[in-house]
Amino acid sequence: MTLEQAAWLILGLNAIALAFTLAAFVAGGVRRRAATIIGVSGVLWLFVLRALLSNGEPFPEDIGGTAFFAIVLLSVALVGALLLAPASMRRPLADMDQTWLLAPQGIRVFFGATFLLWAGEGLLPRTFGVIDGFTHVTAGFLGLIAAWAVARDRNATRMPWIANLFGLGDILVVATSIAYVLLGDIGPHHPMMYAVFAPAPVWLWLHVVSIGRLLGIGTALDATRLTTASA
């Protein structure tokens, strides 16, 4: 597999992840108009990301780990603002059943399988690719199991806690590892960046919202919005 083929593979997974997440949002109470806006924004962002990364932009090849990590944090903040600042999204997310907050994590199974494939093909350092692949697959299955548990019992909290803490930890460890350990090996324009700058921030915020709900902060998206603004 070439890097170009890997890029198209991950872009296809991004499109599936976007569709799956929007379907969960609508099922969870988000108005179709708001979901459509999010969907169109997501598709446009994928086109922009493809245009940038395929042309060696927007990062210099020798960008440092700290600068890269700061850009990752900025992208997380921007996605949080898109998801949580508009009342048309914030209020439905605040009231959304945990099932629909957790179910979108399930798509991570396919991202994890892709990273395992890349490790086997030599497109990722083997140790990182295998570990990251298995942790993503695990996070995806835990998200689905937790969603199923809540669907059966609305008061279930054990599996949602496990899924959220493991999934959130996976994202944070991987993002830090890419910036400070892996960046010199794969560079800032590797197909991996289609995951870093597209679905990963959405998964992170869904974990944050779900954890807020578990903590009993029913309308805590206002608090999350403040976190986003301060970021």
Image (cartoon, grey):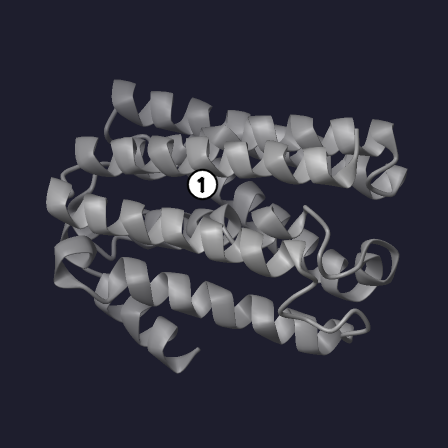
Q: Is residue 198 visible?
A: yes
Q: Is residue 157 visible?
A: no
- Towards the viewer: 150 or 88: 88
Residue 121 shown left or right of residue 137 in the figure? right
Q: Position of residue 98 (x, y in %)?
A: 28, 37
Question: Compared to 95, does 5 lie above or below?
Answer: above
Q: Position of residue 58 (x, y in %)?
A: 62, 69
How many circles with numbers are drawn on the protein? 1
Q: Position of residue 107 (x, y in %)?
A: 49, 30
- Towards the viewer: 158 or 36: 36
The C terminus is located in which quarter?
A: bottom left
Q: Quadrant of residue 118?
A: top right
The outermost residue toward the bottom is 230
Question: Compared to 3, does 215 lie above or below?
Answer: below
Question: Compared to 195, does 131 lie above or below?
Answer: above
Residue placed under numbered mark 1 in the picture: 161
Residue type at mark 1: give it: Trp
Residue 148 shown left or right of residue 65 in the figure? left
Residue 129 shown left or right of residue 54 in the figure? right
> Which secondary structure lies at badge 1?
helix
What residue is rendered at 49% in x and 66% in y?
75
How dense is the environment of label 1, judged by Cα within 10 Å: few (below 14), some, or many (20 and up)? some
What residue is rendered at 82% in x and 73% in y?
62
Residue 149 shown left or right of residue 143 in the figure? left
What residue is rendered at 79% in x and 28% in y?
1
- Towards the viewer: 198 or 109: 198
What residue is rendered at 82% in x and 56% in y?
182
Q: Position of residue 9 (x, y in %)?
A: 61, 32
Question: Compared to 186, does 19 lie above or below?
Answer: above
